[in-house]
Structure formats: structure tokens, C-alpha cells
Image (spheres, rainbow, N blue to C red):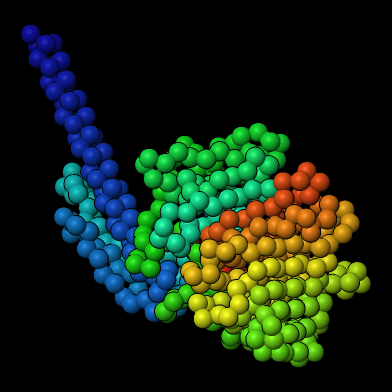
């Protein structure tokens, strides 16, 4: 009986100790969850209130059904207008690059559970965290082809087709509304948003084998509505957005050296820009005097000339330039054709924006370069614009775009096996960091 009594006492003592240990784990888990919930609310607030804001104010949040609180201090400027390089660089996702940064300093206060059991010296756990919001062009970060959602409120089906090789990542925002040709190949791809009843697409790698998206098997999704919320939902509106948008390519270019022309007014400044007055605009990327160009209205034909062999080998030393084509419903001419003459090694951002009224008509484009390898260094952004290559005008050969393409319309290239278009990443962007439209993401450090 004595041995039995001692055994039971030891067993009860062991159970009591084990119960205290379990309660300790419960308190630790509860406190960790409290901290994670607070940080989740903080990140949601940063995405909603600070990325697009041009003047962020001090904000205090209480975590629902708790005494926990968090404070986000005021930010100085919009992430999309920042020219501050990151304090620390951490590669995230698909090679985002360094880009620019704004910093938000935050404080978290958590009421800890289980004070008596854990014998803690104080009941509150307080810590601070820096949130860094980075911004950079998606094309410069490795997303060489980005297919955005169309602006039209009516259901549309876009096409990505032709003998196209994407030496990087492809980004397909609305996969169910896009048809992808058999000859399109990409190193990788992502689908950030699909609906519950959507059927995901499958793309092919450079060897022609079907591959899964980078975010497989996690079901991709996004949040926010077009214009109505600050969370991004995949629509493209960066060239000349309505209202006080924090990022506008055209507004930024107006702050730099530029020339503005209209297609119905003859113009020739002897510095690389010629307008015939009948809707034809010619721009010479070989001119050392060429600055940024804004073509406001009335463009029927756009001809962009590259460089001679001598200038081509030195063109990467020339300043980067942006060309903006901005057409409204009041334009007398609609853009019908873009011609890329010769070859180009000068860093270029080409932005094309057409009104909703004009967007139903496609724009043809052609590369006229000859030889085995024609190079065009360019980031192309097309809003409300469907681009279809003029197959009969394009000679045989390999055509290489160094930079990338972002569009909310169709992009169609020749299916001819003798005509291949290759997209490659720009590894020396220089001033393109400032000219190219940006995306944003969040990083944090204790």
C-alpha cells in the first residue's frame, strides 16, 4: 500500500507538471498568435493606406477583442514617387531588384497571457519594426511580359500569340480571358488572380514542354477594385491616370527635359523629332540632342528610327528617353501603325495610351531591321491598345527586345518559324529606374 500510495502521488505530480507545461505552451502559442494578428493588421493597413498615399498620417489601431494595439507613424511620400534607394536589400520572389524605398516605423504592444504561470516580469510585450515599401518596374525586375486586365467593362478576350520566346517570367493577370498561342514559350510564369470557376492556363517552357505556374499549387488571388480601392487588382493605368494618382509617367516626364507636340501641327526642332502635320510623327533615337517626347493627340503613324552601326555601338552611353503617345476621344487621328526602323541600343521607354472609344481598333507594328539578329532596347507599355505585327512587312530573322512589354490588350507576333521574337531582361537600367512605371511590395525588419 505504501508503494502504491507513493506511485500514485508521483503520477499525480507528473500529471500536474505536464499540465503546467501544456498551459505554458498554450500561453506561448496565444501570445505568438496575438503578435502575428497585430502584424497582419499592420501589413493590411500599409498596403491599403500607405503605398498609394502621397502624405501618410499617424495611425493607431486596436486589435479586435483584445487590448493589443499598434501604431504606424507618418510616411514622408508615396512609394511610387520615391527616389531613395533601399537601406538594405533582400531579394524577394521573382528577382524584384533593389528599386526605390519609403520607410514606415511601427510600434506593437501585446498584452501577454499567463503571467502568473510563466512568471514573467512584465505584462506587456512592446517592440518596434521598420516596414520598407519598395517600388520598381516589373519589366526591370524580370517580369518581361505582363498581360493586364482590360479596362473595358464588357467581357473581352485577348490574345498572346506568335513565335515568341520570353527569357524570363510572364505575368498573366486574367488567364481565363486570354488565348495563348502554341508557339509562345516562357522560362516561367505566374497567374496572380483567378476566380473560383476559372480554369488555369498552362504555358510552355523554351523546350516546348508544358509547365506549372510559379505559384502552383497555391491558388492565386488578389484584392481591391479598379479605381474604388487602393489595393491593386491588375488593371493598367500608369501613363496618365485620372485624378491625383501618385504615379504618372506623363507627370514625371513633364518635370524633366522634354518636348511636346501634336500630330496636326508641323514641327521640326532639328533635335530628332519631326511632325508632318498630317498625323505622322518621326523620332530619331540616334540624335544626341533628343530629349523625352510627349505626343499629345492626333497621331496616325509613329516611326521610331534606331542608330547607324557606328552610333549603335555607343548608344548605351546616351541618356535614356521616354516617348509618350497619349490619345483622347477628341483626337482627330487614331494611331494605326508603329514602325521600328533598324536597330536600337539606347534605353527607351515607349508608352502608348488610347481612349476607350479608340481601343477597339488594333495597331499594327513592324520591325524593319535586317540581318540575323535585330536588337531593340525598349520597355513598351500599351494601355487600351491591341498590337498586331505586320507579318508581310517583317523580314525573316531573329528580333530581340531587351526590356519587356506590359499591356492590357492583345499582343500578336508572326507565327512564321523564320521570324522569332525574343524578350530579354535589361541588366543595366540606369535612368530607366525613374522613367519606367513601377510596382510595389512590402519588406520588414526588426
> Quadrant location of residue 379?
bottom right
Q: Nearer the viewer, residue 409 or 63?
A: 409
Q: Residue lying at the far left in this picture: please name it.
A: 1
Q: Position of residue 402 (x, y in %)?
A: 73, 60
Q: Position of residue 421 (x, y in %)?
A: 74, 52
Q: Say above or below: 295 vs 144.
A: below
Q: Position of residue 185 (x, y in %)?
A: 67, 43
Q: Quadrant of the C terminus?
A: bottom left
Q: Nearer the viewer, residue 178 or 393?
A: 393
Let me know if residue 250 appears in the view. Answer: no
Q: Say above or below: 176 vs 324.
A: above
Residue at 71% across / 79% down in the picture?
Answer: 281
> Quadrant location of residue 73?
bottom left
**What count of labels does the image hold?**
0
Q: Quadrant of the N terminus?
A: top left
Q: Is residue 130 left or right of residue 65?
A: right
Q: Say above or below: 217 vs 106.
A: above
Q: Is residue 439 left or right of residue 49?
A: right
Q: Residue lying at the far top in this picture: please name it.
A: 1
Let me know if residue 23 appears in the view. Answer: yes
Amino acid at each position: 500500500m505504501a508503494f502504491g500510495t507513493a506511485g500514485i502521488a508521483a503520477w499525480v505530480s507528473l500529471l500536474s507538471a505536464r499540465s503546467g507545461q501544456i498551459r505554458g505552451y498554450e500561453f506561448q502559442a496565444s501570445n505568438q498568435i496575438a503578435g502575428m494578428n497585430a502584424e497582419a493588421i499592420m501589413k493590411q493597413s500599409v498596403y491599403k493606406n500607405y503605398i498609394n498615399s502621397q502624405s501618410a498620417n499617424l495611425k493607431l489601431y486596436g486589435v479586435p477583442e483584445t487590448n493589443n494595439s499598434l501604431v504606424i507613424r507618418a510616411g514622408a511620400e508615396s512609394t511610387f514617387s520615391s527616389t531613395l534607394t533601399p537601406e538594405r536589400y533582400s531579394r524577394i520572389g521573382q528577382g524584384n531588384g533593389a528599386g526605390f524605398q519609403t520607410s514606415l516605423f511601427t510600434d506593437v504592444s501585446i498584452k501577454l497571457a499567463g503571467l502568473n504561470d510563466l512568471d514573467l516580469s512584465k505584462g506587456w510585450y512592446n517592440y518596434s519594426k521598420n516596414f520598407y515599401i519598395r517600388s520598381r518596374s516589373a519589366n526591370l525586375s524580370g517580369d518581361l511580359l505582363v498581360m493586364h486586365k482590360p479596362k473595358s467593362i464588357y467581357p473581352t478576350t485577348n490574345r498572346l500569340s506568335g513565335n515568341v520566346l520570353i527569357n524570363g517570367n510572364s505575368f498573366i493577370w486574367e488567364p481565363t480571358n486570354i488565348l495563348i498561342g502554341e508557339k509562345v514559350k516562357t522560362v516561367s510564369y505566374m497567374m496572380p488572380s483567378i476566380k473560383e470557376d476559372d480554369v488555369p492556363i498552362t504555358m510552355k517552357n523554351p523546350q516546348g514542354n508544358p509547365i506549372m505556374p510559379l505559384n502552383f499549387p497555391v491558388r492565386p488571388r488578389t484584392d481591391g477594385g479598379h479605381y474604388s480601392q487602393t489595393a491593386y487588382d491588375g488593371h493598367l493605368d500608369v501613363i496618365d491616370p485620372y485624378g491625383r494618382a501618385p504615379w504618372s509617367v506623363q507627370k514625371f516626364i513633364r518635370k524633366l527635359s522634354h518636348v511636346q507636340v501634336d500630330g496636326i501641327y508641323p514641327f521640326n526642332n532639328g533635335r530628332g523629332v519631326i511632325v508632318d502635320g498630317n498625323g505622322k510623327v518621326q523620332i530619331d533615337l540616334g540624335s544626341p540632342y533628343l530629349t523625352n517626347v510627349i505626343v499629345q493627340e492626333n497621331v496616325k503613324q509613329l516611326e521610331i528610327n534606331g542608330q547607324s552601326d557606328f552610333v549603335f555601338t555607343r548608344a548605351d552611353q546616351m541618356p535614356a528617353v521616354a516617348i509618350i503617345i497619349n490619345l483622347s476621344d477628341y483626337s482627330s487621328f487614331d494611331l494605326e501603325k508603329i514602325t521600328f526602323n533598324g536597330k536600337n541600343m539606347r534605353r527607351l521607354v515607349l508608352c502608348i495610351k488610347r481612349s476607350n472609344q479608340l481601343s477597339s481598333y488594333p495597331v499594327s507594328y513592324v520591325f524593319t531591321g535586317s540581318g540575323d539578329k535585330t536588337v531593340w532596347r525598349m520597355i513598351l507599355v500599351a494601355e487600351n491598345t491591341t498590337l498586331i505585327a505586320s507579318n508581310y512587312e517583317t523580314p525573316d530573322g531573329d528580333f530581340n527586345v531587351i526590356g519587356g512589354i506590359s499591356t492590357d490588350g492583345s499582343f500578336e507576333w508572326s507565327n512564321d518559324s523564320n521570324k522569332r521574337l525574343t524578350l530579354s531582361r535589361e541588366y543595366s537600367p540606369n535612368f530607366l529606374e525613374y522613367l519606367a512605371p513601377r510596382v510595389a511590395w512590402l519588406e520588414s525588419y526588426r
